[in-house]
Amino acid sequence: MDLFSIQNQWEGLQAQLAPQEGPVLLDLSRVGDLDLSGLQLLLALDRHLASRGDHLSLSGIRPEWLDRFRPLGLATLLEGRP
């Protein structure tokens, strides 16, 4: 999930989420890397779901992502979501 793929990923998520309601579980275990653009997509998705009263759960969080974003104060979305 990086700058070069983020637009397509957001459009794909929007298309999948539009017809359904309820909580969303997103499995990140097959994601090779997560940069700030990818984190921004996850934050936007979290806000979008919260605005309609739904919840985002994440699985497959890699420890290196937490190590990367925690010093910047940006790991909140990833922490506590196994």
Image (cartoon, rainbow, N blue to C red):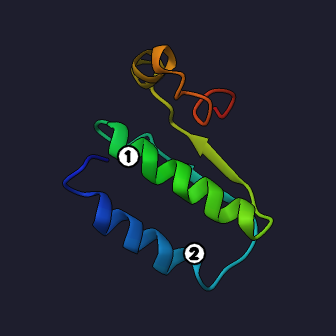
Rendered residue at 39%/72% (across/down): 12
Q: Residue at x 19, y 54 (%)?
A: 4
Numbered badge on residue 38: 1
Residue 9, x across and y down, in percent: 35, 63
Question: How many angstroms separate mark 1 from mark 2 (CA)?
Answer: 18 Å
* Residue found at the far left of this picture: 4
Identify the image quadrant of residue 75.
top right
2 above or below 47? above
From this viewpoint, is residue 18 visible? yes
Instruction: Name the kind of residue labelled 2 in the image.
Output: Leu
Q: Amino acid at mark 1?
A: Gly
* Residue 34 visible: no
Against 71, residue 22 (above or below) is below
Residue assigned mark 2: 17
Figure quadrant of the C terminus:
top right
The quarter holding residue 22 reads bottom right
Up-down relation of residue 52 to residue 50 (above or below): below
C-beta proximity under 8 Å, tags 1 and 2:
no
Is 1 positioned to the left or the right of 55 in the image? left
**In the structure shown, which secondary structural element does the residue marked by tag 2 occupy?**
helix
